[in-house]
Amino acid sequence: MKIRFIIPFFLLFACIAGLPVTAYAVPQLTIGVAAEKINNTARLNFGIDNSSASYAGVNAKIQLPANVSVKSVSKGDLLSSSFFTSHYSPAANIITVMAYSGAAVFSGNGILFTLELDTASASDGTHSVVFGNSSNAFVNSRCALSDTSGNSVTLTQKNGYLAVGQTDSDNDGLPDALEYAIVGNYTGLSPDDDFDKDGRSNLAEYLSMTDLNNPFSFAEIMKGDLNNDQEISLADTIIALQIVTGISVSNISSESAIDGKKIGLADAVYSLQLVSDLRD
Ligand SMILES: [Ca+2]
Ligand SMILES: [Ca+2]
Ligand SMILES: [Ca+2]
């Protein structure tokens, strides 16, 4: 039987059997994985996965780990034209976020917002970050999403992790707490692999403070920015020259090389020309 006949037969059978013909995936509210990086800072993403309907809004409370505070909240790609507000209660360490899309419904997979966190006072290790799930502490936890008619939408909620501490048992550039948060041990994550298949290596994502367990979280690569600090400077020239002369430099990802593969003399020349205003 040809495939084009199979589908109508299935639909007919489904109607007779009373099965729902439109099978939407259950949307998932997600909290990502964030790792402490420079200046005791981490960026944690809140997103929607697997949604195949449109949503008018989200209303959720999130419990942060002890001694972690919110520095800032920024809208993600799904909320470019939406109403958005948040309230942080330091005493309870809970952040409440309400985001409503108005006429322009948001749908699909992606990031709703990002929290920039201060992890300076948190204890080393892997901490859970959870959605509210008890009515006395958290409101609206079971209907965090509503549809365009204001009705609550069935969804699942996936909590996240915050990895604090720079101890690195296998000396591969990925801290123990981060490896543990993703694979459950201190050595199982390879810096050169791309765990979430978004085109950025695990090490590159750690360096740019994006979520290496979320394909919708990644940073644009700035060619020549070898140390991933979002600017081209003499520091990049020095790193390139060190690598060319065989000096080992840690925590550098070759994805930011000019050719995207291998750091070489061309990278040193490129950053030097930019710094010297010899090229645009
Ligand atoms: Ca490691
Ligand atoms: Ca990745
Ligand atoms: Ca990612």
Image (spheres, rainbow, N blue to C red):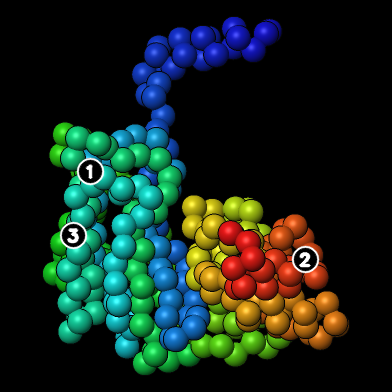
Q: Secondary structure at mark 1?
A: loop
Q: Secondary structure at mark 3?
A: strand
3 or 1: tag closer to the N-terminus: 3
Q: Which residue is mark 2?
A: 266
Query: How far is disc 1 from disc 2 in space, using C-alphas?
Result: 46 Å
The amino acid sitting under disc 1 is: Ser
Q: What residue is at 42 percent from the left and 91 percent from the top?
A: 123
Q: Is residue 277 left or right of residue 135?
A: right
Q: Is residue 266 left or right of residue 90?
A: right
Q: Which residue is mark 3?
A: 85
Q: What residue is at 60 percent from the left and 90 percent from the top?
A: 167
Q: Residues within 10 Å of mark 3 (few under 14, many from 20)?
A: some
3 or 2: tag closer to the N-terminus: 3
Rendering coords of residue 10 (x, y %): 51, 15
Q: Secondary structure at mark 2?
A: helix
Q: Quadrant of residue 119?
A: bottom left
1 or 2: tag closer to the N-terminus: 1
The N terminus lies in which quarter of the figure? top right
